[in-house]
Image: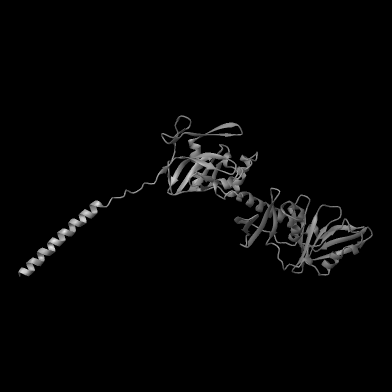
């Protein structure tokens, strides 16, 4: 019994000794205070390829911030860099040309002071002590513009709900940049960010414009329409083999590798349309596309029959080949007109597309084509056409 009592006393003393030692250790460990992240000022430097300006943070939701800035100052590019410490990429997502204001959207995990838009009169429009904006002053074409808080709020709401498309941004920036501003020398090296090496909006606009002109070239068979877009005559000659228009073209990706630019898009069939581009004396030029099929038979190029220059029917071998069914497509330029007639054999019919001087197109089908030899010359005629007014059509004469 004595042994049991002594054992219990020993255990109790040991427990007391452990607690005392534990308290002593806990009291001697310094307590680290949690570092509070700083809140940055509402006024932040904004860097574009053509200027350095300032912007005002006017809205914040978590990582997302929206910054008010002079629209003309940043009109040279769809992106900017925000804050000298973070150099966060900002997207220009709202522009009001009339009031010369723009909204830049950034995603940054740090907190910023946010200026409140208020409908009241305060000194100089922006009061940083109270954190309020009554109006925002800018200068556009030497004219002072005061944009009230109400107008700024409308643009902010619109930007958050539905950011501007690249097409709208391109058009608005063109209006703001009547006098082109030269980029800052060595800008990207200075700021250690490489987002200004090309303007994605300009590249997409170039690609869309090219596709529009390319489709017009197919309609009119006038391939000079796309000459200014191409790097060489060889590229144009290859594109002349393409007969399928690119409908509902949509750009999906723009990128740069070395000195080459690439614009990838899709057509209405969701087929990929790729354009390879270089800069030539400051202008974009297409050096290649995936529209050219390397397996294409170049001898099937659409033959052009100009009846103004043909003096004998023997000068029209392509027309004879079309009549005999050896080739399926021809283009006829009628005698003493500016019209162009594209004929294609489909399902035992002749599909005719006529482009007039006003660039309008008429389409119909005919059953056959004949060559008639009459006293006043030889005539090319289409017979049995679906358009009753043109059941027999004189395309021209040889003389």
Q: On the rendered image, what quadrant is the N terminus found in?
A: bottom left
Residue at the (91%, 63%) spot, across then down: 373
Task: Name the foreground residue: 135 vs 13.
Answer: 13
Q: Is residue 168 left or right of residue 283?
A: left
The x, y position of residue 141, in whole percent, is 61, 34
- Please identify the residue farthest to the right as the structure is shown: 375
The x, y position of residue 116, in whole percent, is 43, 38
The x, y position of residue 202, in whole percent, is 63, 49
Can residue 281 be seen in this snapshot? Answer: yes
Residue 2 falls in which quadrant of the image?
Answer: bottom left
Eyeballing the image, is 95 above or below 223? above
The x, y position of residue 133, in whole percent, is 46, 35
Eyeballing the image, is 380 above or below 161? below
Q: How many dots with numbers? A: 0
Q: Is residue 4 left or right of residue 130?
A: left
Eyeballing the image, is 12 above or below 62? below
Q: Is residue 234 left or right of residue 117?
A: right
Task: Name the foreground residue: 247 vs 126.
Answer: 126
Residue 304 falls in which quadrant of the image?
Answer: bottom right
Task: Name the foreground residue: 352 vs 98.
Answer: 98
- Please identify the residue farthest to the left as the structure is shown: 1
* Colour scheme: one colour
Residue 310 falls in which quadrant of the image?
Answer: bottom right
Q: Is residue 389 left or right of residue 256?
A: right
Can residue 328 be seen in this snapshot? Answer: no
């Amino acid at each position: 019994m004595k042994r049991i009592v002594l054992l219990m006393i020993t255990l109790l003393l040991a427990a007391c000794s452990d607690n005392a030692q534990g308290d002593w250790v806990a009291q001697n460990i310094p307590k680290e205070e949690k570092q509070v992240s700083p809140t940055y000022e509402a006024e932040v430097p904004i860097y574009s390829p053509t200027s350095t300006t300032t912007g005002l943070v006017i809205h914040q939701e978590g990582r997302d911030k929206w910054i008010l800035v002079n629209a003309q100052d940043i009109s040279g590019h769809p992106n900017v860099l925000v804050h000298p410490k973070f150099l966060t990429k900002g997207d220009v997502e709202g522009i009001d040309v009339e009031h010369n204001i723009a909204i830049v959207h950034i995603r940054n995990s740090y907190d910023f002071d946010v200026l409140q838009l208020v409908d009241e009169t305060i000194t100089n429009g922006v009061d940083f002590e109270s954190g309020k904006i009554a109006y925002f002053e800018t200068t556009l074409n030497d004219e002072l513009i005061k944009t009230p808080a109400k107008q700024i709020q409308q643009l902010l709401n619109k930007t958050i709900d539905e950011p501007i498309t690249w097409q709208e941004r391109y058009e608005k920036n063109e209006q703001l940049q009547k006098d082109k501003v030269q980029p800052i020398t060595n800008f990207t090296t200075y700021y250690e960010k490489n987002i200004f090496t090309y303007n994605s909006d300009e590249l997409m606009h170039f690609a869309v414009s090219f596709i529009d002109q390319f489709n017009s070239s197919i309609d009119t068979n006038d391939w000079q329409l796309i000459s200014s877009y191409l790097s060489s005559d060889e590229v144009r000659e290859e594109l002349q083999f393409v007969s399928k228009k690119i409908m509902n073209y949509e750009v999906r990706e723009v990128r740069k590798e070395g000195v080459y630019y690439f614009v990838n898009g899709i057509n209405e069939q969701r087929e990929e349309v790729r354009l390879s581009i270089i800069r030539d004396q400051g202008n974009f030029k297409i050096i290649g596309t995936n529209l050219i099929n390397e397996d294409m038979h170049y001898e099937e190029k659409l033959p052009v029959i100009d009846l103004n220059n043909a003096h004998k029917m023997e000068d029209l071998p392509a027309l004879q080949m079309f009549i005999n069914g050896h080739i399926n497509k021809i283009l006829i330029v009628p005698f003493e007109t500016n019209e162009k007639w594209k004929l294609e054999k489909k399902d035992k019919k002749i599909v005719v597309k006529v482009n007039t001087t006003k660039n309008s197109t008429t389409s119909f089908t005919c059953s056959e084509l004949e060559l008639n030899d009459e006293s006043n010359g030889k005539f090319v005629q289409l017979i049995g056409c679906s358009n009753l007014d043109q059941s027999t059509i004189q395309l021209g004469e040889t003389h």
